Structure formats: C-alpha cells, structure tokens
Amino acid sequence: MERCIDYAFDNNLQIKQQMISAEQSGNAYMQSRLALLPTLSFSGSQSMNWGRSVNLQDLKIIENKLTQATSASLSSNITAFSGLVKINAIKRNRLQQQIERTNVEKLKNEISISIAQAYLQVLLSMEILDSYRQSLESIASQEKRTAILVDAGSQPYSDLLDIQSQLASERVQVVTAENQVTNNKLTLSQLLDLPLNENFEIEVPNLGETPEFTGEDVEALYMKALTLPQIQSAKYALDKSRVALDIAKGQRLPSIGISAGYGTYYSDSRDGAFLEQFKDNRNPSVGISLSLPIFEGGQNYIGVKDARLSVNSSEIALQSEKQTLLKDIQKAVTDANGYYQQYVAAKANETSLEESFRLVEQKFNVGALNSTDYIVARTNLYKAKSNLSQMKYQYLFHLKILDFYKGKPLTL
C-alpha cells in the first residue's frame, strides 16, 4: 500500500497539475518582489531625411539634402511611495504560494485515503474469494461422499441432486468473487494512473490479530488534526484576504514616483564630430511625480468594502473547515467503535455457526439429516464468514483514518 501511495505521488495527474499551480504562484511571488526594484530602459534611434529639414545648429531650412541623426537615451523609474501596495502585494503573493503548496498536500492526503480504501477493498474481495474457493472445494468433497452414501442406500438420491445444485451455485459465487477482485484491482490501478495493460498485483500483508478498539479522545485528536493542510490553507486564505484589504486601503492614498533620464543625439546637419556632438548634446533629467486619487467613480471605496466582506467570508470559511474537521473526527471515532462492535459480534457468530455446521455435517454424513438442513447451515456459515471479513476491513479502514488524523503515515 505504501508503494501504491508513493507511486501516485509521483505519477498522479491531479497532483502534477496542482504542483504546477504551486510553481506558478511562486513565480508571481518572485515577480512582486522584483517589482520593488527601479526600472531601467535604454532606447536608441537612427533616422535619415531626404526632404526638407531643419539645421538644429542655426535653425535654417535644409532643402532636398540627405541628413542623418542618431539619438540614445537611458531612463529609470521607481515608486517611492504607493500606500504600501507593492509591499502588501508581496505578502499576498507569498500567502497564495503557501495556499497552493498546502493544496498539494491536501490533494495528496485525499488520494492517500482513497488508495488505502481501495487497497483494503481489494484485500477484502481476495479474502472473500478464498472463502468461496474453500467452500467450493468442501462442497465438491461432500458431493463425492453423498454419491457414495446414495449408492449404498444410506441417503436418498434427492440429497445428491441438492448437493449438486449447491455445487453449481458455489461455482457461480466463485466466478462472481473473481470478477469483484478484478474490478477492485481496476479501481486501485485507475487511482494510480497506471499505464494500460500494466501487470498489476498487490502484496497481501500479514495483518495479524485485529486490534481491540479502546476508544479515542475526540478533542485531543481534533487538536492534532488542526495542522492538516485544509485548515492551514483556510488560515492562509484568511491572512491573504486581510492583506488584500490593506492593498485596497492603500490604493486610496497618494503615490509618489521618482524618475531619472539621460539622453543625447547626433545630426550631420550640425557641425561637429559624432562623439563631440554626443558629449555636447547630453540631456540629463530628474523628475518627481505625485498622484492623488480624488474621485474614481467610487471604485476604491467599493473595493475596500468588498475586501472587508472577503475577510468576513474567509473567517467563516476557516470556522467551517474546523467544524467539518471536528464532525469528521467525531464520525470516524463513532464509526470505528461501531465497526469494531460489529466485528466482535460477527466473529462470535461465525464461531457459533462453525460449531453448529460441524455437528450438522456429521449428522448429514451418517444420514441423520436431510440435504435441505445441511445446505441451509452451510449457507449461513459462509454468509457469516463473508460478513466477518467485511466488518474486519471496514474496522481496519477506519483505524487508518484515525491514524491519519493523528499524523501517522498510512501503512499496513
């Protein structure tokens, strides 16, 4: 089961898709950090003019003469203050990255539980198949004994017909159980996204004695489970909505920008060498700008109101996740206890029916019991065995769920 889970982590398409989302959110976080740095850009141009132009040295008109000009400039801009919008954007994108990462872990947990359930379902169907095969072998042996007794006149021929009918029914049950094993393996292989026609067999572990259920402290289990990804993701989402509110408030504040530039040019319509003109025509500049939002159609005002509502919504979402977690834990503990009690009762029932069937079989073999009573006793026994297997694996699965809430790895 552990290998199945590890394989799913490496190959499941949903996990791969979620990991890409996490990586993209990391890129957005890096981009918002780089946005704090000044911008720097260079531009240059080369132009030629065959018509009328102006001599920039003496401002005379030049007619029908080829003139050439070269210009270059370097500029830089930086936002000195913008209501901490950029700083808060970094916080928001970092929180989004954490949300995406926890969503990867959340998806892994969900897939792990699904795989554990599917794996145990395969084991259950294999155990039921073994039980039906044993039953088939037993009834086949009984057919031979009954045939001998019928030939000897100890039992009526109708008993042999009843046994043969039961044998045919047992063969059908074996085929049905084999199909169930195949279907359950298919379900598990699809959860793993295994390639088509992959040769897929599972290990049957030695489960040992079924452990006794001694109860669980729901509150203690809940406190441990608060570190699960779905809770952490909801917490990050709440923090992100609070930062988004700060961003909305910051957009109502003035913004201050600082710019600097350096430019120069050369023209063959002027006297002077290329480098000499580039030196003489240099044009450095520094500027400062102020932007104050006064009225923007209520956009910033409504934006703040919406951001506050998002905070309220995120708070409710976090409480809802916690309530859901508590309810799930309560149900898991209740179900584990319930399935354990059913398992204990089913085991006692199987033990009782095994002894009863042993006596019935002895009587039937000496002709002291008819075939109808024998078949009824036999059917009841194997129904009890099947029910015991189902209760055992349901109980084991819910123990795995409780281990998951405790932070333990899902193992058998």
Image (cartoon, rainbow, N blue to C red):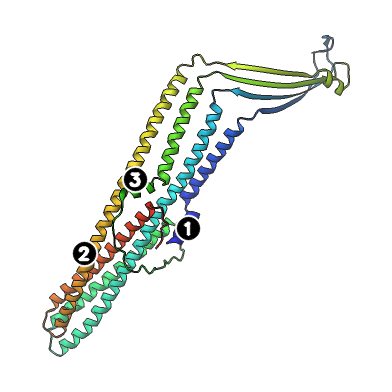
Circle 2: element type: helix
Q: Position of residue 4 (x, y in %)?
A: 44, 60
Residue located at (43% from left, 21% from top)? 302
- Report the residue marked by disc 2: 345
Cα–Cα span, label 1 and label 2:
36 Å
Image coordinates of residue 139 in percent, x first then y, are: 23, 78
Q: Which residue is denoted by mark 1 in the rendering?
A: 6
SS at mark 1 in the image:
helix
Q: Note whether residue 67 is visible.
A: no
For marks 1 and 3, the one nearer the N-term is 1
Spatial distance from mark 1 to mark 3, Cα to Cα?
25 Å
Q: Residue at x 18, y 72 (%)?
A: 352
Foreground disc of the pair 1, 2: 2
Tag 2–tag 3 contact (CB < 8 Å): no
* Side (left or right) of 195 relative to 137: right
Relative to residue 114, is residue 73 drawn left or right?
Answer: right
Q: Earlier in the sequence, mark 2 or mark 3?
A: 3
For label 2, count other residues whose C-alpha is less than 10 Å away and answer few (under 14), some (14-19) or many (20+). Answer: some
Q: Mark 1 vs mark 2: which is more N-terminal?
A: 1
For the residue marked with disc 1, what is the amino acid?
A: Asp
Which one is closest to the eye, mark 1 or mark 3?
Answer: 3
Do labels 1 and 2 touch, CB within 8 Å? no
SS at badge 3: helix
Q: Quadrant of residue 131?
A: bottom left
Q: Amino acid at mark 3?
A: Leu
